[in-house]
Image (cartoon, coloured by chain):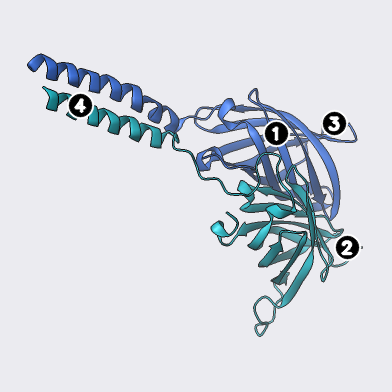
Chain colours: A blue, B cyan
Amino acid sequence: MKNNIARALLVLAAASVVALAPIQANAAQCSLGSMAGNWAYTYTGTIFTQNGPLPAASVGRYHQDTAGNITGSQTRSVAGNSGVEEITGKITVNGNCTATANINVFQNASLQRSAVLALVFDSNGNHSRTIFKSLTLPDGTDVPVVITADANRLVTRD
Amino acid sequence: MKRTMLFAGAVLFGILALSLVYQGGVPPVHAEGNSEDGCSAATLKGSYGFNTLTGFVRLNPRSSRFVPDVAAGLVTFDGGGGFTGKATNVTNGDIAPETPPFPFALVGTYTLDSDCTGSLTEINSGTHLNLVVVNNGKEIESLQTDPQETRTLEFKRIMVGEHE
């Protein structure tokens, strides 16, 4: 009798470990794989030029694959002048849900600028918050900017 | 002995069921909003509140000076490419205290491609937006594309169950 109870408890303990382990794994981590998908975003902010500050904004859509490659397109407006651009880039995602992205922006296949972004994924991996760390022109000129972005998944994960 | 095994079985079943729920193993209920690459004009049907995230307008095209320009309001999409609504707009802080709420009538058209990007034209103000529908059709990210304006707007569905 005692042996049977002990055996039953042992089975229960083993089953509990197997069944509940993934819960802990899900609770914390972000990865390239888990953040892949189709995203849309807006960014807004200010570009500081020698002639004064200019408002900048954009709306866009991109796909992020499981290797961190980003491809997409956006419409941007700088001081009231809008244009359509293509974006490509690479993102690295840390386990604590912070990330860094290097993005190149093209117009008609011509590189317009490159940006380094710092991101944090929240809302269970359905949303991210971003700030531009730097913006560089093709000739190497660094352009001072204060720009933040919000991105949402096109289709929310459960 | 039998009672012990029955009890152990019940507890085991409970643990497994609990783990399935926590892991999202229970089939989720999906809205009929956008799916991956599956938007159409019908994706937008119902009422959305909106506001400007940031907005600036150049009142004098020959000037380099921009002033803040923001709006909030309500639009109702008909699911077929049209919408109506109302809005309040504030430019550089100028709004008379006696101004009634949401005095501007909105009416216009929209298009939505299968990849959930699209455009919107508001006729009364001549506003043009490029947009992307996100979060299963519950939210819209957008950018105004008119000259002299740099403005982003966000729309959120008022009744989440309205289009489910």
N-terminal of the pair, mark 1 or mark 3, is 1
Q: Chain of mark 2?
A: B
Residue occupied by mark 2: B63
**Which quadrant holds the N terminus of chain B?**
top left
Q: Amino acid at mark 2?
A: Ser
x and y, in percent, of residue A108 in the image: 90, 35
Q: Chain of mark 1?
A: A
In the orientation shown, which residue stands out farthest toward the bottom?
A: B98
Q: Nearer the viewer, mark 1 or mark 4?
A: 4
Residue in front for this viewpoint, A23 or A92: A23
Badge 4: few (under 14), some or many (20 or more) residues near its Cα, within 10 Å?
Answer: some
Q: Give me the C-alpha separation between circle 2 and circle 3.
A: 28 Å
Task: Report the number of numbered marks.
Answer: 4
Residue occupied by mark 1: A63
SS class, disc 3: loop
Residue occupied by mark 3: A138
* Apparent side of residue A45 relative to residue A26 in the rendered image (left or right): right
